[in-house]
Amino acid sequence: MGLPRLANRLTRAAVTAILVVTAALASGTGAAWGYLSTTGAGTASSSLGTLQPPTNVTVPTESATGTVSVSWAASGGPLAPTGYFVTRITVSTGATTDACGTSRPAPTTALACSDVAVPMGTFTYRVTAVTRSWTAASIASGSIAVT
């Protein structure tokens, strides 16, 4: 059935609206889909936003105590995160560890934290914004040497 013929078959009393939205995520890791089906007449609206990553992740360049202070700027944009989780990255191996007592299922709403009992080595930190099932990771901080 062609599009003009299909359009002629729709009436004001019974309109079926199907909305399929595909939004490529900024990281290119996937797409978001939405589906709506309804009958009747009227108007509707929808909005789509992108979760922005936190910025300005900072750490000191050195720590002799095994405690690292991490701070960051809040995510901007129309979609506000419900929290953040922090990851410590070992520079020599690329291994990641949850830091500051945070994790994906247990984020913090603070914009700073202290990572305690950090072993000796060189590390960077990444902060990830979370809202529902969406995440947006910051770029890694500068390196910190724990001696």
Image (cartoon, helix red, strand yellow):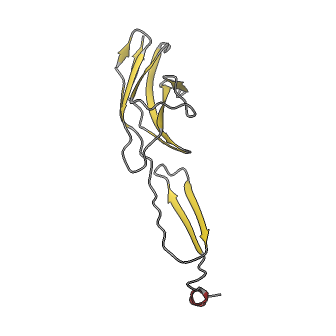
Q: Nearest the camera: 12 or 89?
A: 12
* Residue 86 versus residue 52 in the image, above or below: above
Residue 112 position in % (x across, y down): 39, 26
Quarter of the image with the N terminus in it: bottom right
At 43% across and 14% down in the image, what residue appears? 67
At 59% across and 66% down in the image, what residue appears? 36
| Number of disc labels | 0
At 57% across and 59% down in the image, what residue appears? 33
Quarter of the image with the C terminus in it: top left
* Residue 34 versus residue 134 in the image, above or below: below
Q: Nearest the camera: 113 or 63?
A: 113
Q: Is residue 113 toward the left or the right of residue 95 in the image?
A: left
Task: Let me know if residue 142 appears in the view.
Answer: no
Q: Is residue 55 toward the left or the right of residue 9 in the image?
A: left
Residue 48 position in % (x across, y down): 46, 58
Residue 18 position in % (x across, y down): 58, 71
Q: Nearest the camera: 82 or 58?
A: 82
Residue 44 position in % (x across, y down): 49, 69
Task: Let me know if residue 106 appears in the view.
Answer: yes
At 45% across and 42% down in the image, what residue appears? 81
